[in-house]
Image (tube, rainbow, N blue to C red):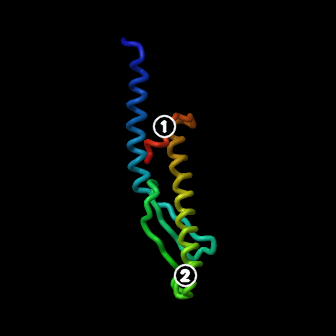
Amino acid sequence: MLKGLGDVGQMMKLQKELKSTQKKLKKKEIEGESKNGLITAVVNGEFKILNINIDKDFLNSGDKDKIEKMILSAINSAIDKSKDYAAQEMKKITGGMNIPGLDNLMK
């Protein structure tokens, strides 16, 4: 048997798991909300915005600056949660090992 074939097998397994995780992240929907809870944003595991919901009364308040700030707050909350989720999924694959460049594969 050739020396090192076990390593190739491990790398192929890791590659397959990465592709599976990428698909899972693309489908995963994660919700964040503004600090006041009146706006929610939903992103997927690839940090793409899927939905924004603004409380009708808050929207009708007409406070444009506050609404804009709360939209950003909700989106950033969802993205932060999505990053945490993606990191947890990567830890499952790598067993907590820090593999340089692996984070870039998830983008």
Quarter holding residue 5: top left
Which amino acid lies under the numbered mark 2 shown in the image of this protein?
A: Lys
Residue named by callout 2: 64
Residue 1 placement (x, y as % from top left):
36, 11
Q: How many marks?
A: 2
Mark 1: secondary structure: loop
Disc 1: CA contacts within 10 A as few (<14), some (14-19) or many (>=20)? few
The residue lying toward the viewer, choosing from 79 and 88, is: 79
- At 55% from the left edge and 62% from the top edge, which residue is drawn? 76
- At 39% from the left edge and 24% from the top edge, which residue is drawn? 8
Which amino acid lies under the numbered mark 1 shown in the image of this protein?
A: Gly
Give the spatial CA distance, label 1 vs label 2: 41 Å
The mark closer to the camera, 1 or 2, is: 2
Above or below, comparing residue 53 to residue 7 in the picture:
below
Residue 35 placement (x, y as % from top left):
63, 71
Residue named by callout 1: 101
Q: Earlier in the sequence, mark 1 or mark 2?
A: 2
- At 51% from the left edge and 84% from the top edge, which residue is drawn? 56
Residue 97 placement (x, y as % from top left):
56, 34
Q: Cβ–Cβ below 8 Å for labels 1 and 2?
A: no
Disc 2: CA contacts within 10 A as few (<14), some (14-19) or many (>=20)? few
Above or below, comparing residue 48 to residue 96 in the picture:
below
Q: Which mark is residue 51?
A: none
Mark 2: secondary structure: helix
Above or below, comparing residue 80 to residue 35 in the picture:
above
- At 50% from the left edge and 46% from the top edge, which residue is drawn? 89
Q: Residue furthest front?
A: 65
Q: Is residue 68 left or right of 15 when viewed as pictured?
A: right
Residue 105 placement (x, y as % from top left):
43, 42
Q: Is residue 57 left or right of 26 when viewed as pictured?
A: right
